[in-house]
Amino acid sequence: MLSGLLIVLLPLLLGYLVPVRHAGLMHLINRGVNASVYLILLLMGISLAGLDDLLAELSRMGSQALQLFLVITCANLLALWWLSRRLALRIEHSPIVAGAPTTKLAAMLGSLALVGVVLGGVLLGLGLGWLGGDAVYGHAETLAEWTLYALLALIGCQLRNSGMPLRQILLNRHGLAIAVTVAVSSLLGGLAAAPLLDLRWNEGLAMASGFGWYSLSGILVGDQLGPVLGGVAFFNDLARELLAFVLIPLLIRYHTPLAIGYGGATSMDFTLPVIQQHGGVACVPLAVVSGFLLSLLSPPLILFFLTL
């Protein structure tokens, strides 16, 4: 089990050791991450097409994803509401950024596009299976595994070269408190949801460790537990991001830690423009620090729980 964890974590660690000082190369790495995510989600859809009784499996996946999402969301919102009251952190006087680079609608459409890639993979898999037999699904899983290793190496490079020194991160106590609260409450939610989903306790913890990073959680879980549970993890974390786009404008002025924290790992990238637009510049360091810490925690936690 530990050897399997090491094999998957090794690319991440190797990528983290590589400093990148050329802006053009960093741009290529970022594009490589995006391309790898789309490719793996397409291959995940192809693998789903190989399941027996596909419609029943997809229905079960949707039901499990909804249950997991509701339990973890309740745990997150309660814990972050408590943290908001304890910190009493408000940003009424923070200047608002007039032209944030991404609108809520554009960001939500970008998230939903990933769902379209998975569904496209299912349709493609059905066609390829009809033409080439069941061997197609085995090849898709092998290719997805190798693409995953490349993706983890590229993500390691991104984290190393994000421009956030660890000292600066650890000194931001509010951002650290938000990240810890999200992580602990998510894990408690995953533990509580495990018996509802007929999962082992460690599988429930692994499913809850995505912290909103749907493009990675679905891939890692699917690689270890199969495409159905990979889909559950993916849709659970995707639903978190979509709800975050709704909650941030409503809550960020008076419940700042709750609004930023619920975005999870996405608060340093996908939901950051919405946080910046509605909360102002004072929210940006909190969002980046909490999102970075959760992004750093997510891959090793998922892999660790899956090896237990």
Image (tube, grey):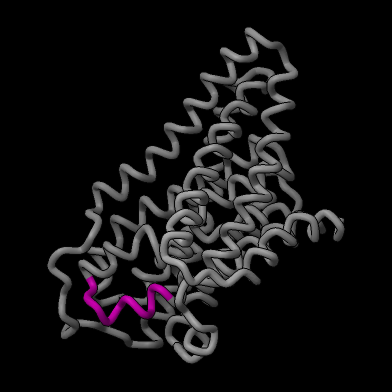
Q: Residue furthest top?
A: 131
**Image location of residue 193, percent across then percent down:** 62, 53
- Residue at the location (40% across, 54% down)? 241
Q: Residue furthest left?
A: 98
Residue 261 horizontal side relative to residue 68, left or right: left
Evaluate whether residue 188 shows in this view.
Answer: no
| Secondary structure mostly seen in the magenta stretch | helix
Q: Which of the 4 image quarters holds residue 301?
A: bottom right
User: Is 286 colored magenta in this rendering?
Assistant: yes
Number of numbered discs on residues: 0
- Residue at the location (70% across, 33% down)? 141
User: Is 229 colored magenta in this rendering?
Assistant: no
The quadrant of the image that shows the C terminus is: bottom right
Q: Which of the 4 image quarters holds residue 282?
A: bottom left
**Image location of residue 17, percent across then percent down:** 65, 71
**On screen, residue 25 above or below 92:** above
**Image location of residue 53, percent across then percent down:** 65, 18
Query: Which stretch is magenta?
Result: 279-288
**On screen, residue 43 above or below 127:** below
- Residue closest to the eye, 251 or 150: 150
- Residue at the location (23% across, 64% down)? 250
**On screen, residue 138 above or below 127:** below
- Residue at the location (62% across, 69% down)? 18
**On screen, residue 208 above or below 38:** below
Evaluate whether residue 17 shows in this view.
Answer: yes
The quadrant of the image that shows the N terminus is: bottom right
**Image location of residue 72, percent across then percent down:** 52, 58
